[in-house]
Image (cartoon, helix red, strand yellow):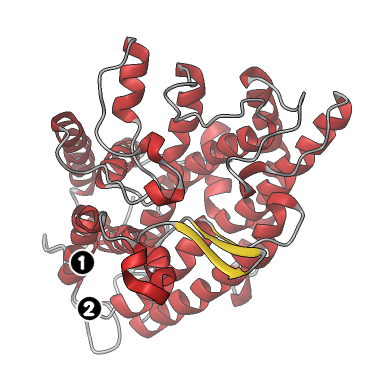
């Protein structure tokens, strides 16, 4: 499936300007996994726009199994995005790109993503000007950081990434207020919050850099394992080990699910799990891990099973059927991401008109904003609109994938 190194060592040999030029074709399994989580991501955003439920799915006092699962399954999206962004960057070094080229691509694409977040993406959520540090913001600044990190030896990159993932919850009790007038900096780095810009305008920081930079760095180092003859065994071993470690850490309730998100208003998914009045709620409490910022438990819970799936997908051809659809989405991730928000938002408006409901653009702009009376739909309708949105997205994404394939010399297309 891939061209592999003849040596069992996982650390590639460097020259002064690049990695050793061993060619490796694009891995279909990576594209299919990325496409799968992108399809799942659209479910969460469809729920954001169309739900009639005013409370968060993580709120144990008001949730149920179906509602929580609809939210839980989408937790896999952002970690896989960030991790595979690093993996893809490493694999590009095996297709002839020098270290300088990879570093430049990281910084230029990262800044481009930040610009897109603050303009095209943020506008899509509410069709109003708005400033929000969402997933594209987090990926963008993580890439800027990776532009420097890639110059380190590969083992150091692995240690840095894993260390940031495993140890960042030690920073949870640091309050942004302890930095005085620089509290905004800690909100951008580790503890989500609202940063006042003017008397009437605030910047919402949700996807902080620690530990998302670490997730991308770990993914970069992980890419070297895909060049080994026994890479499938390594992928499955790491995935199973991470999943098992999640159950151990979550079970003992001592470390791994932080409280840094509390100032941002997420006490419903912070701290230890506990036994609830029903088995369903107890299971929900156990899997209700902190996403803002992503706790160690959250990352083990999502990346572990995702790597297992990646190992099981090893060797997939994806020439037809569902595999082909997922591969198409996985090869144009940014194009899909930007387009899917607009498609779902328009579907929500059409649904409101069709059912004679008020049109509401609140969505995630204000998590606690009250939906208008009579607005929204139940889960069956949400799932149906999710499938419709994904179906609408397929042909544009396939067209763009084929355009990029025909015009590989158009370097600007790699930024879309």
The residue labelled by disc 2 is 152
Q: Is residue 286 left or right of residue 321?
A: left
Which tag is nearer the camera, tag 2 or tag 1? 1
Q: Can residue 414 be seen at all in this image of the molecule?
A: no
User: Foreground residue, 85 or 162?
Assistant: 162
Q: Crowding at label 1, few (<14), some or many (≥20) Cα neighbours within 10 Å?
A: many
> Spatial distance from mark 2 to mark 1, Cα to Cα?
10 Å
Estimate the x, y position of residue 253 in percent, counting from the top left: 17, 34
Q: Position of residue 197 (x, y in %)?
A: 59, 71
Badge 2: how crowded within 10 Å, few (<14), some, or many (20+)?
Answer: few
- Residue located at (31% from left, 42% from top): 298
In this view, which residue lies farthest toward the top? 278
Residue visible at 23% across and 53% down? Answer: 169
Residue at image position (41%, 60%) is: 208
Which one is in front, 62 or 87? 62
Residue 360 in view, yes or no? yes
The image quarter containing residue 14 is: bottom left
In the rendered image, the quadrant that contains the C terminus is bottom right
Q: Which residue is mark 1?
A: 160
Residues at circles 2 and 1 in contact by the CB criterion of under 8 Å:
yes
Q: Secondary structure at mark 1?
A: helix
Whether residue 119 is situated above or below residue 270 in the rendered picture: below
Q: Secondary structure at mark 2?
A: loop
Residue 278, compared with residue 415, is above or below; it is above
Residue 296 vertical placement versus 373 (above, below):
below
Q: Which mark is residue 221?
A: none
The tag earlier along the polypeptide, 2 or 1, is 2
């Amino acid at each position: 499936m891939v061209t592999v190194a003849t040596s069992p060592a996982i650390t590639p040999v460097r020259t002064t300007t690049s990695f050793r030029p061993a060619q490796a074709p694009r891995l279909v399994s990576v594209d299919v996994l990325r496409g799968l989580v992108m399809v799942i991501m659209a479910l969460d955003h469809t729920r954001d726009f169309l739900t009639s439920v005013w409370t968060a799915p993580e709120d144990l006092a008001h949730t149920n199994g179906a509602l929580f699962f609809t939210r839980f399954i989408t937790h896999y999206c952002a970690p896989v995005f960030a991790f595979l962004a690093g993996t893809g960057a490493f694999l590009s070094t095996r297709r002839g790109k020098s270290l300088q080229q990879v570093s430049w691509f990281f910084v230029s694409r990262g800044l481009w993503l930040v610009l897109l977040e603050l303009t095209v993406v943020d506008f899509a959520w509410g069709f109003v000007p708005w400033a929000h540090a969402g997933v594209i913001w987090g990926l963008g600044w993580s890439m800027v950081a990776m532009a420097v990190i890639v110059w380190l030896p590969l083992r150091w990159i692995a240690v840095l990434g894993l260390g940031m993932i495993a140890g960042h919850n030690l920073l949870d009790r640091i309050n942004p207020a302890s930095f005085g007038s620089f509290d905004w900096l800690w909100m951008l780095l580790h503890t989500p919050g609202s940063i006042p810009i003017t008397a009437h305008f605030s910047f919402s920081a949700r996807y902080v850099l620690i530990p998302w930079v670490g997730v991308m760095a770990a993914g970069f180092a992980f890419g070297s394992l895909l060049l080994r003859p026994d890479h499938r065994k390594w992928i499955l071993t790491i995935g199973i080990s991470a999943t098992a470690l999640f159950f151990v850490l979550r079970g003992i309730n001592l470390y791994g699910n932080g409280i840094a998100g509390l100032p941002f208003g997420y006490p419903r998914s912070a701290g230890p799990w506990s036994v609830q009045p029903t088995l369903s709620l107890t299971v929900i409490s156990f899997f209700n891990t902190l996403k803002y910022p992503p706790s160690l438990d959250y990352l083990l819970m999502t990346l572990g099973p995702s790597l297992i799936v990646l190992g099981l997908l090893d060797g997939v051809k994806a020439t037809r059927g569902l595999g082909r659809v997922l591969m198409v989405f996985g090869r144009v991730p940014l194009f899909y991401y930007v387009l899917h928000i607009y498609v779902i938002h328009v579907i929500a408006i059409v649904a409101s008109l069709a059912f004679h409901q008020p049109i509401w653009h609140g969505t995630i702009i204000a998590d606690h904003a009250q939906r208008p009376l009579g607005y929204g739909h139940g889960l069956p309708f949400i799932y149906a609109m999710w499938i419709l949105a994904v179906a609408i997205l397929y042909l544009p994404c396939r067209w763009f994938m084929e355009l990029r394939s025909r015009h590989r010399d158009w370097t600007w297309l790699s930024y879309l």
